């Protein structure tokens, strides 16, 4: 009897039902009954001529800006859409193969969270890639919906819940009530735009070219969206644009705040637009429920304060905003019948 119990316990450890957060910056995979089993950047390095994959994830991200002529490091979902189908498919297949264990179910189920606003053709590419690695029962869910579930918002109630998910390529603003979007906007301005703005700022102010990964590091370490919310500085090395030699620079929080002002303001504007378009009933709900800020961009220092000040609403950042979407997708997988109606057709 105990042998049987052990065996059952053993088998239940291996499930081939998965949920995946296919983000523009990071891909995370949740295994049913287990939790998060993979968390890697959405980057693939391929050989230009043959298309052969040479590195995926963290290793490939290190390649950015450092590849020899015959290799390119690609972020296949960069601008919130699938810019490169073949590479996206290769990445999905690679990651699922990494986490996939022994097959023990007949119809492996998969919930995939996709950037909202993805087209039918792009959805098909995602579904195809999952199918090709053996997944059979495939369901798509939009990013802000998954983020809301992952943040424990009572999405099924007739009550407005607002989520702002700030990723790499897109910022999704959604107001959810009765399990559906009462309003949603997907803005192609998010973390990547901030990194690019830092590169431009340093170039203009110091005549120094900075790599994109270094710019991201600076944003994460000392970036802020609200004056006084953080004061620090970072030492970086770039390339002097005048004579091509390496140049050491010290960048301050104020520099970074100035550099990223445009993308930050664009995000705040999209929040204001959402509130303007909502019926008064939902706006008054928000007074009570507030705004949940998720995605990696939620970690930008002072952004919560800035949005709270502009909207007069409470803004809160859950404990691990980078995990909300995958945890929400995972919950939709675990409680499939409860969340059936939130999946895309
Ligand atoms: N502490 C931080 N401060 C500001 N931005 C951050 C921080 N941590 C991560 N990010 C940014 O969050 C973005 C990635 O967030 P994520 O939710 O994983 O995106 P996606 O859903 O598009 O994959 C990147 O632009 C990254 O630079
Ligand atoms: Mg995301």
Image: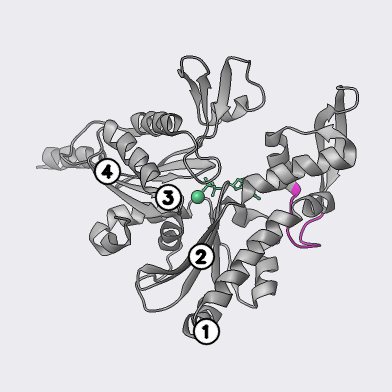
**Is 101 in front, or is 252?**
252
The residue carrying mark 3 is 326
Residue under the image location 52 percent in, 84 percent down: 284
| Element carrying mark 1 | helix
**Is 184 in front, or is 8?**
184
Q: How is the image coloured?
A: one colour
Q: Residues within 10 Å of mark 3 (few under 14, many from 20)?
A: many
**Is 73 in front, or is 34?**
73
Residue under the image location 22 percent in, 37 percent down: 10
Q: Is residue 301 visible?
A: no
Residue under the image location 81 percent in, 30 percent down: 238
**Is 91 in front, or is 149?**
91
Q: Are marks 3 and 1 in contact (CB under 8 Å)?
A: no
Upstream in sequence: badge 3 or badge 4: 4
Give the Cα distance between marks 3 and 1: 29 Å
The residue carrying mark 4 is 17
The residue carrying mark 1 is 284
Upstream in sequence: badge 1 or badge 2: 2
Give the Cα distance between marks 4 and 2: 27 Å
> Is residue 15 depicted above or below 224 in this figure?
above
Residue under the image location 45 percent in, 76 percent down: 160
Q: Which residues are magenta?
A: 222-231
Q: Quadrant of residue 20?
A: top left
Relative side of 148 to 129, left or right: right
Upstream in sequence: badge 3 or badge 1: 1
Mark sitting on residue 163: 2
């Amino acid at each position: 009897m105990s042998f049987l119990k052990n065996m059952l316990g053993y088998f239940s450890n291996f499930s081939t039902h998965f949920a995946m957060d296919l983000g523009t910056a990071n891909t995370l995979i949740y295994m049913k009954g287990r939790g998060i089993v993979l968390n890697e950047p959405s980057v693939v390095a391929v050989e230009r001529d043959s298309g052969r994959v040479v590195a995926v994830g963290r290793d490939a991200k290190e390649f950015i800006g450092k590849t020899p002529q015959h290799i390119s490091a690609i972020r296949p979902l960069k601008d919130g859409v699938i810019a490169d189908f073949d590479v996206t498919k290769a990445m999905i297949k690679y990651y699922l193969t990494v986490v996939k264990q022994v097959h023990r179910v007949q119809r492996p189920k998969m919930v995939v969270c996709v950037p909202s606003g993805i087209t039918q053709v792009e959805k098909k590419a995602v579904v195809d890639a999952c199918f090709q690695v053996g997944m059979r029962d495939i369901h798509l869910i939009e990013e802000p919906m998954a983020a809301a579930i992952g943040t424990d918002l009572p999405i099924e109630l007739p009550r407005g819940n607002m989520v702002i998910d700030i990723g790499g390529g897109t910022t999704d603003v959604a107001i959810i009530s009765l399990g559906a979007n009462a309003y949603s906007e997907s803005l192609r301005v998010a973390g990547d735009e901030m990194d690019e703005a830092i590169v431009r700022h340093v170039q203009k102010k110091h005549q120094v070219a900075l790599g994109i990964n270094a710019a991201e590091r600076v944003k994460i370490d000392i970036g802020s969206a609200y004056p006084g919310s953080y004061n620090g500085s970072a030492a970086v090395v770039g390339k002097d644009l005048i004579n091509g030699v390496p140049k050491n620079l010290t960048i301050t929080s104020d520099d970074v705040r100035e550099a990223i002002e445009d993308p930050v303001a664009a995000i705040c504007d999209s929040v204001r637009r959402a509130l303007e378009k909502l019926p008064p009933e939902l706006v008054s709900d928000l007074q009570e429920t507030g705004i949940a800020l998720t995605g990696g961009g939620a970690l930008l220092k002072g952004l919560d304060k800035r949005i709270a000040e502009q909207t007069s609403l409470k803004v809160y950042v859950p404990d691990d905003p980078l995990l909300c979407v995958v945890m929400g997708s995972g919950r939709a997988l675990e409680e499939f019948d409860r969340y059936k109606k939130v999946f895309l057709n």
